[in-house]
Structure formats: structure tokens, C-alpha cells
Image (tube, grey):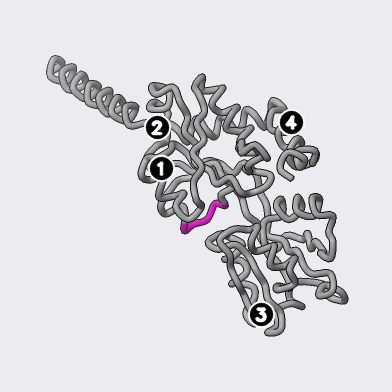
């Protein structure tokens, strides 16, 4: 009887070990370590998270974070520039290991991909033509048929705009730059987009004819996205985030891109 029990326990142990080995083989983290390279998908058009400088180099808050991420893994970093409308599909197709691109965590996206713990929280805010903003107190004062609100297509800014504005005209553009240009050209009355982008826009442009309504219209946590079924990678990412938030690394990178705007000279 004892021999049978010992044999059964040995058999179960072997199965567990084999199962663990299979999971490790399928782990993205293991693939990264074996490859010697961390591949990151991002759309370089979201200041100050990721953008191109005058020389075409991709720089920004997210770039510095993933550079530290790769360093702590002991591997090289490869950034894969990707259009926003195909960025999740690219991850699922294995074109890169992770999305680090100022992506808001939503339940809809979470059906397709998993997110590590939020690394920053932002909200939608508004840039409004000064002549239109005069005498008005909130976005509700612009929810009228005579006003046109613009935003970027396919992002949470569009979702928030369509949810909030039921009477104003809504127009969307492929890039945030095109949408805000419509505001500058006087063809739109307000632009809805993420607070960091709007804050940087005001710092860069000097607010000529534009008013920044900086009160958050939404609560939006941003997260790093990975493929489903990969607990090892998620665990490493959450521990990495916890570490850099407590050893001063995160604050150093944050202050560089959100409190010091000297980097604007590199992209103007």
C-alpha cells in the first residue's frame, strides 16, 4: 500500500513539474530572456509619453521607463512603432511582447488583453477657444448645437466626448495634432484629450487664443498591456513597478517629463 502511495505521489509530482515546465516555456518573460531583447509596441505621437524628436528618435516618459525595464531584465530594448488602431492586434499577433503607449485600462480592452497594475492615472481635459470660453464655467455650457467639439479617433477621448456631449457637433481625426489644429484654425470650439498632452500643448504654444480647462472630466488609469495567460510576466511587471516607485526611479523619470519642459526644445 505504501509503495502504491509513493508511486502515486511521484507520478503527481512529475505531472506538476511537467506542467510548470510547459508554463515556463510559454512565458513571454522566458522568451524575452532567451531572445535577449524586450520588444515594446508604442505609437510615438503622445506627448510626453512617446514622441519623435527633431532627429526622428523616439523619446518620452514611457521610453525611459521601458529602457529601465530592459536594463533590469538584462536584455536589449527594441521599440516597435505601431499605429494606434492596430496596436492591440500587433500584440496578439506576437509582433512585440508588451504595449507601453499611454494606454487607458478599460473593461472592453481587458476582454482581449491583460494589464499590469496602473502606472499613472490621467483624465480627459479640454482646450477651448478663448472667445468661446468667455463667460462659461464647464463643458456643459458647450453642449449645444452651435458648438463643435473635436478629438482623436478611437481613443478614450472620443468615448468620453460622445458620452458627454449629446447636442454639440462632434468631429474626430486620425491624430491629436490634426484635431487640435482644427481648433487653432477656428474650425472647432473645443478639443477633448488627455491632460498631459493638453498641458504640454499649452506650455509649448503659450496659450494664444486658447484656454486650458484642466479639471479632469474622467478618471483614467494607464497600464502596460500583455497577452492573456501569462502570469509570470504580469508578476514581474507589477514587482518592477513597485520597485521603481519606491526607490526614486519613477519620480526622477516623472519629473523629467512632466515638471521640466526643457525637452520641448528637442521636438519643436
Please identify, in this view, whether the residue under mark 3 or under mark 1 is nearer the observer.
3
Q: Earlier in the sequence, mark 4 or mark 1?
A: 1
Towards the viewer: 20 or 13: 20
| Mark 3 neighbour class, 10 Å CA radius: few under 14, some 14 to 19, many 20 or more | some
In the image, residue 145 sits, relative to residue 83, either above or below, namely below
Q: Which residue is mark 2?
A: 28
* Residue furthest bottom as drawn: 145
Where residue 48 sits in the image (x, y, percent)?
69, 44
User: Disc 3 to disc 1, how far (Cα)?
Assistant: 38 Å
Residue 19: x, y in percent?
27, 29
Q: Which residues are magenta?
A: 104-108
Disc 2 from disc 1: Cα separation: 9 Å
Q: Which residue has dot 4 on it?
A: 252
- The residue identified by callout 3 is 168
Q: Nearer the viewer, mark 3 or mark 4?
A: 3
The single residue placed furthest to the front in the displayed view is 55
Q: Is residue 193 left or right of residue 258?
A: left
Front disc: 3 or 2: 3
Instruction: Give the number of the disc on residue 227.
Output: 1
Please tell me whether residue 58 is drawn above or below residue 244 in the rendered image.
below
Q: Earlier in the sequence, mark 3 or mark 1?
A: 3
Is residue 72 shown left or right of residue 35? right
Amino acid at each position: 500500500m505504501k509503495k502504491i502511495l509513493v508511486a502515486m505521489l511521484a507520478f503527481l509530482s512529475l505531472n506538476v513539474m511537467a506542467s510548470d515546465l510547459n508554463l515556463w516555456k510559454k512565458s513571454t518573460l522566458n522568451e524575452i530572456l532567451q531572445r535577449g531583447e524586450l520588444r515594446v509596441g508604442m505609437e510615438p505621437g503622445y506627448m510626453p509619453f512617446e514622441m519623435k524628436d527633431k532627429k526622428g528618435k523616439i523619446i518620452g516618459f514611457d521610453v525611459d521607463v521601458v529602457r529601465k525595464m530592459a536594463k533590469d531584465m538584462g536584455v536589449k530594448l527594441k521599440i516597435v512603432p505601431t499605429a494606434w488602431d492596430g496596436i492591440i492586434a500587433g500584440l496578439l499577433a506576437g509582433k512585440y511582447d508588451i504595449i507601453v503607449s499611454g494606454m487607458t485600462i478599460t473593461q472592453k480592452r481587458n476582454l482581449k488583453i491583460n494589464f499590469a497594475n496602473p502606472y499613472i492615472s490621467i483624465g480627459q481635459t479640454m482646450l477651448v477657444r478663448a472667445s468661446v470660453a468667455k463667460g462659461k464655467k464647464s463643458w456643459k455650457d458647450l453642449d449645444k448645437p452651435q458648438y463643435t467639439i473635436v478629438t482623436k479617433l478611437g481613443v478614450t477621448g472620443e468615448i468620453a466626448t460622445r458620452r458627454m456631449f449629446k447636442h454639440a457637433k462632434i468631429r474626430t481625426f486620425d491624430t491629436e495634432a490634426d484635431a487640435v489644429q482644427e481648433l487653432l484654425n477656428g474650425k472647432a470650439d473645443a478639443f477633448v484629450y488627455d491632460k498631459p498632452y493638453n498641458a504640454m500643448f499649452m506650455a509649448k504654444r503659450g496659450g494664444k487664443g486658447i484656454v486650458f480647462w484642466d479639471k479632469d472630466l474622467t478618471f483614467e488609469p494607464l497600464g502596460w498591456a500583455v497577452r492573456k495567460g501569462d502570469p509570470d510576466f504580469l508578476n514581474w511587471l507589477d514587482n518592477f513597478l513597485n520597485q521603481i516607485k519606491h526607490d526614486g526611479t519613477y519620480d526622477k523619470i516623472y519629473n523629467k517629463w512632466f515638471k521640466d519642459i526643457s525637452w520641448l526644445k528637442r521636438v519643436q
